[in-house]
Amino acid sequence: MAVLITGGTGYIGSHTIVELLGAGQDIVAMDNFSNSKPAVLDRIREITGKKIRFYRVDMLDKPGMEAVFRENNIDSCIHFAALKAVGESVARPLLYYKNNVTGTINLLELIAEYGVKRFVFSSSATVYGKPPSVPIREDFPLSPVNPYGQTKLMIEQILADLSASDSGMSVVILRYFNPVGAHKSGRLGEDPRGIPSNLMPYITQVAGGKLPYLPVYGNDYNTHDGTGVRDYIHILDLAGAHLSALDYTERVRGVEYFNIGTGRGYSVFDIIRAYEKTTGKRIPYQIAPRRPGDVDECYADPGKANRLLGWRAKYDIEDMCRDADRWQSMYPQGFED
Ligand code: UFG
């Protein structure tokens, strides 16, 4: 029996595969390499000593995906594959709705047809939009502010309806906060295309001399130092949450939602300071205008995941900075083919 991982060569998918292989799970992975590279598969093999079954297939290619189900004995699925750039989703909404929503419907039709009952979905804290207060609990109002976030919320709704229609199904929806860091070996990490839009990969490229300085998007937010506050979570902790979620689908039926964060908020200045302290490298910055759509503060109440999944984040902000920096130093060009 195998776990199907969609988006298996992406940042979160690849780290999760390493965790699952370590736990003795049998893996079948797929990806279309739209935002990842085949070299990731070699790194997974180097780290784990195991080879996984892999299919290069696009989620809009349903016959191509069906072959994966036909040729393997799949009993659960962790669904990561999606387009995820917020700005691009505003500029090209139809691309996002088609890829993320239609692609997921194709997958779910096959899940139903092949009798797969256990499903874990990669959602995002972005579904909360601007939260009325922090820390954010799972029962807070949902109001995403961009098409990317809307696709995540639509898929959550589709999954809730699907699970209501089939009492044998078990669906876990994980709402991630801000994943950062890299594998301890330094061989696997985040490899954004072009200039990074997220904070940590931008900082690592400044630290490595690829970019001259960090633009700090706004210093007049209602936070302890004026810069935006987020809940950064180590990618290995996030990967571990998927193992716990998969385990949960074996025990409990229905649909359940979990925030996956540390419960601690750090500002942009806090992150710059932590990075400089742990790596000894200097991060020059310049204050820039606010980025549209950014909120003051966003951090999780992860209590529900702690209680029901038995999962808790282990790594602190210094681990996140140290590991992100190691990956950047070892592979300044990311994954080369
Ligand atoms: N920031 C900067 N400079 C940069 C990049 C970011 O100052 O060059 C600031 C942002 O303004 C924000 C913080 O750093 O205050 C974090 O920004 P990120 O872009 O790293 O992360 P976001 O919180 O904006 O978004 C991330 C993911 C989304 C996801 C969301 C969930 O990119 O996909 O977390 O909270 F939906």
Image: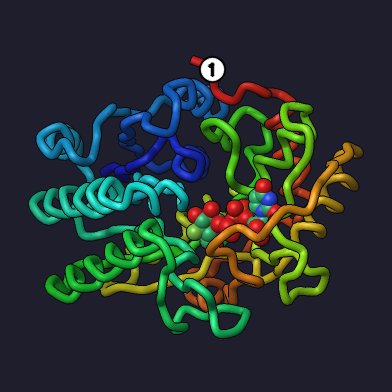
Residue 90: x percent and y percent?
39, 54
In the image, 1 versus 160, the foreground residue is 160
Identify the residue shown where x is 46% and y is 50%.
Answer: 87
Snapshot quadrant of residue 65:
top left
Is residue 276 toward the left or the right of residue 137 in the image? right
Residue 14: x percent and y percent?
47, 38
Instruction: Count up the numbered dots.
Output: 1
Is residue 74 toward the left or the right of residue 337 in the image? left
In the image, 119 versus 280, the foreground residue is 280
Quadrant the N terminus occupies: top left
Q: Is residue 270 visible?
A: yes
Snapshot quadrant of residue 2:
top left
Q: Amino acid at mark 1?
A: Glu
User: Is disc 1 placed on a helix, strand or loop?
Assistant: loop
User: In the rendered image of this protein, does residue 270 appear above or below residue 200?
Assistant: below
User: In the rendered image of this protein, does residue 28 appear above or below residue 294?
Assistant: above
Is residue 70 toward the left or the right of residue 6 in the image? left
Identify the residue shown where x is 18% and y is 76%.
Answer: 164
Residue 130: x percent and y percent?
52, 75
Q: Is residue 76 visible?
A: no
Residue 34: x percent and y percent?
37, 32
Colour pattern of the rendering: rainbow
Identify the residue shown where x is 41% and y is 25%.
Answer: 51
Ligand 1 quadrant in view: bottom right
Identify residue for label 1.
336
